[in-house]
Image: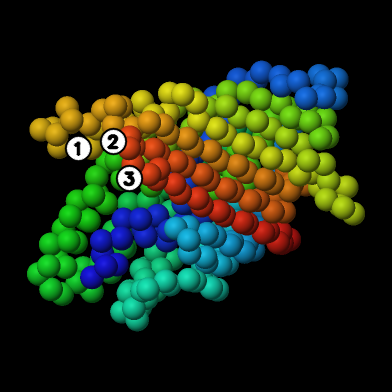
Amino acid sequence: MAILSNMTSRLKTFLLPACLAPLSLLPSQQTTAPHSKGSSGSSMTTLRFSWPIPARASIIEESLKRGRKAVTSYKFRLSPDPKNPARWIGRISDIKVLKMDTGKANAQQIALSKKILTAISSALPTLSIQASTLEAKTQGVQKGIDAVLKVLKENTKSPKEQKILQTIEKSMKSKAMLRNLQESSLFFWKAWAGVWNGLTLPAEGSSRSFKGVMYYPTGGQGSCKVTLTQLGSPKGKPQWIRLKYRQDSDSTALKQIVQTMKASIPAPYRDRFNEGLFESAKLSVTITATLDRKTLLPQRVLVEKDSEIKPKNRPASKRFERRDYRFHWEKD
C-alpha cells in the first residue's frame, strides 16, 4: 500500500495547509549589516506589525511540491487569548481541497487521503503568539498525529501493511518528528507576519543584507545570508508595499546536514557516513510579499524553496517547492 510508505511526508501536508516548511526562519536572531545598493540610512524605515485584533481572513493557497499542484482554501483567525491578555491565539479552520494533482494514486489511496484530511481538520494545532514580540508556539500537534494514526489503523488490513504502519507509527511518535512538525507548523506565521515585523527597509529598488538562521530539511540549523529588497508598490496600489526576503545557506550547511543525518543512522554504520561522501549542499528560501504599508496585513505571500545536495560522483538531488497565499481580509 504505497500511501502508507509516504504517510510521514503526507502528515506534514495535512497537519496544517501551510506547514510544509523544512526551511524555517528565525528573524529574532538577525543581526543587521547594511548592503550598499543605492540605499542610505536616512531613507530607511522600520516595519511595525499593526494588524487589527481580532483579524480574520479567507485564504486561497496554491502549492507545488514534488511536481504536484494543489489548491486549498481555509480560514485564519487571530484573536486575543482569553486566558492571557499578553498573547494571541491563531487558528486555521474550514479546510477545503479545491484541486489536487493525485498523480498515479489509485481510488483507494485518494479515499484514504480524504479520510485523513477530515480527521486532521477536526484536530488542527493552534498557535499561541506573544503579542509584543510575535514569537509563536504550537499547541496540539500531538493531537493531529494521533488523528492520522487512528485513520491509518482503521484502514490497514494485511499483515504487511500493519508491519509498515508500525514503523511509521514509531517515526511519527518520535521526539524528532514532533519537533520537526512543531517547527514546520510555525512557518506560515513567520512568512505572513513574523519575518517582517521590526525589519529596517532600504529605499525603493534597493537591498540590504544581514545574517540569519536557517533550519535544514534533514533537521538541525545553521547560519545563512539574508537579503531584503524593497520592490515598491503594485500599480495603482500605493497603500501596499512589495518586499522580497531571501535566505541562502553558507559554507557550513553541508557539515551541519551530515551531522544531523548521521545521528539518525544506526550506530554500527555511522563511521561510514561523513562529509567526504558529498561535494556540496545549497539551500535557499525566497519570500515575496505584498503587505499593507500601515498594518503589514498580507495581501499575497509567495514562498519558494530550493535545495540541492550533491553526493560525490553522483547526480545532485534537487527539490523545489512553492506556496502562493492570497488573502481576503474580513471585518470581524
Whole-percent x, y for residue 329 in the image? 71, 59
Picture quadrant where residue 108 is located:
bottom left
Q: Name the residue under label 3.
A: 178
Query: Which quarter shows the N terminus?
Result: bottom left
User: Foreground mark, 2 or 3?
Assistant: 2
Left or right: 209, with 156 as reference point: right
**How far is disc 1 from disc 2 in space, using C-alphas?**
7 Å
| Residue at x 9%, y 69% (from the top left corner) | 159
Whole-percent x, y for residue 82 in the image? 54, 48
Is there CB contact under 8 Å for labels 3 and 1?
no
Whole-percent x, y for residue 219 in the image? 36, 37
User: Foreground mark, 3 or 1?
Assistant: 1
The three-letter code of the residue at mark 1 reads Ile
Q: Residue furthest front?
A: 313
Report if residue 198 is visible in the image: no
Q: In this view, does 153 lie above or below 271?
A: below
**How far is disc 2 from disc 3 in space, using C-alphas?**
17 Å
Packing grade of label 3 (10 A; few <14, some 14-19, many >=20) is: some
Q: What element carries label 2?
A: helix
Q: What element carries label 1?
A: loop
Counting residues from the N terminus, which is met first, the one under dot 2 or under dot 3?
3
Q: Mark 2 points at which residue?
A: 261
